[in-house]
Image (spheres, helix red, strand yellow):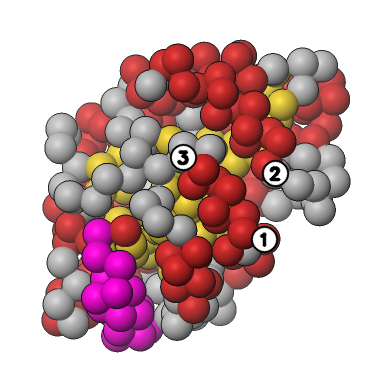
């Protein structure tokens, strides 16, 4: 559990695409947390810049990669940021992907060892979250951290995660969305973002199989049913309504990630539309 108030909704964005100006705009829209994705460097200079530019929003890492950042470096950054900004920072850590880390080995034991080293460096369990998908990792997140930050999941996974974790620990899944009422256009954007990347990574595909998705669903960029489950689409009201599925399944917080056909698109218009649709439900 944690005393950090992450709010009901947050925004997940790659660290390369985050600026202090964007962070302030996201805060002004009413989101509770910015999740810094794509394995930011261990000095967490990007988190410091975002914290300095904002007043209340929580900045969380989603995630610091355990292979790239030694626990001691993550701990030093954690203490620096908490010393300056208090409970506005949450350290999210995880093991990343077998396909992207030459050192990748014994993932569960690596997480345990990393948490042991964070303990030794006096990073409290309440100040950290764990990237977790499978049952063992989810239970570890509940026992040794504030909770879990699952990525590329569905409300069905959220339901199973809550069962594994029990009541109390933070459960903060990420959820992608495309604001487009045309299903074919929206699916094309979704596939371009997940089909050639995430659906080729073994930790995600193993999780999808656990949820009952078939090899045919996962192949060739994903079946329509799988794409629709992983990437919400429609107008802002439709996306907002479907986000409710995570809360009904036991989530405490959802980190939304807008997807676009143009990789350089400004995310603010979509985030603004969604924020307006979410407010009646808050």
Q: Position of residue 183 (x, y in %)?
A: 78, 17
Residue bearing mark 1: 17
Depth order, front residue of 19/141: 19
Distance CA(mark 1)–CA(mark 2)? 10 Å
225 left or right of 133 in image: right
Q: How would you classify the magenta stretch by its main secondary structure?
A: helix
Q: Magenta residues, as a range?
A: 70-87
Instruction: Confirm or deny contact between disc 1 and disc 2 (CB under 8 A).
Output: yes
Q: Magenta stretch containing residue 100, yes or no?
A: no
- Secondary structure at badge 3 equals loop
Query: Going from the N terminus, do you reach mark 1 or mark 2 first?
Result: 1
Residue 40 in view (yes/no): yes
Residue visible at 58% across and 48% down? 25
In the drawing, what numbered circle is on residue 31?
3
- Secondary structure at badge 2 equals loop
Query: Going from the N terminus, do you reach mark 2 or mark 3 first?
Result: 3
Figure quadrant of the C terminus: top left
1 left or right of 129 in image: left
Residue 114 in view (yes/no): no
198 left or right of 263 in image: left
Numbered circles on residues, count: 3
In the drawing, what numbered circle is on residue 267?
2
Q: Magenta stretch containing residue 86, yes or no?
A: yes
- Frontmost of labels 3 and 1 is 3
- Secondary structure at badge 1 equals helix
Query: Going from the N terminus, do you reach mark 3 or mark 1 first?
Result: 1
User: Which image quadrant for residue 129?
Assistant: bottom left
Depth order, front residue of 46/155: 46
Q: Position of residue 197 (x, y in %)?
A: 70, 52
Distance CA(mark 3)–CA(mark 1)? 17 Å
Depth order, front residue of 40/51: 51
């Amino acid at each position: 559990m944690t005393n950090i108030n992450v709010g009901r909704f947050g925004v997940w964005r790659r660290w390369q695409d985050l600026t202090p100006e964007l962070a302030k705009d996201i805060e002004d829209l009413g989101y509770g947390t910015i999740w810094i994705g794509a394995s930011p460097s261990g000095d967490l200079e990007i988190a410091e810049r975002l914290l300095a530019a904002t007043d209340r929003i929580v900045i969380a890492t989603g995630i610091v990669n355990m292979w790239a950042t030694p626990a001691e470096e993550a701990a030093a950054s954690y203490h620096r940021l908490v010393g300056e900004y208090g409970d506005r920072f949450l350290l999210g850590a995880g093991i990343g992907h077998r396909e992207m880390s030459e050192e990748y080995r014994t993932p569960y034991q690596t997480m345990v060892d990393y948490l042991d080293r964070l303990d030794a460096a006096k990073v409290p369990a309440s100040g950290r979250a764990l990237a977790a998908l499978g049952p063992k990792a989810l239970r570890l997140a509940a026992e040794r951290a504030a909770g879990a930050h699952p990525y590329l999941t569905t409300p069905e996974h959220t339901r199973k995660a809550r069962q594994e974790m029990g009541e109390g620990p933070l459960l903060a899944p990420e959820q992608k969305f495309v604001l487009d009422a045309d299903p074919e256009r929206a699916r094309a954007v979704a596939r371009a973002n997940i089909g050639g990347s995430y659906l080729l990574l073994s930790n995600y595909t193993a999780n999808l199989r656990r949820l009952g998705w078939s090899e045919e669903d996962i192949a060739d960029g994903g079946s329509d049913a799988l794409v629709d489950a992983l990437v919400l689409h429609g107008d802002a009201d439709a996306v907002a309504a479907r986000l409710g599925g995570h809360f009904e399944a036991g989530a405490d917080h959802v980190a939304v990630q807008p997807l676009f056909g143009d990789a350089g698109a400004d995310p603010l218009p979509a985030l603004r539309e969604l924020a307006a649709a979410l407010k009646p439900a808050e």
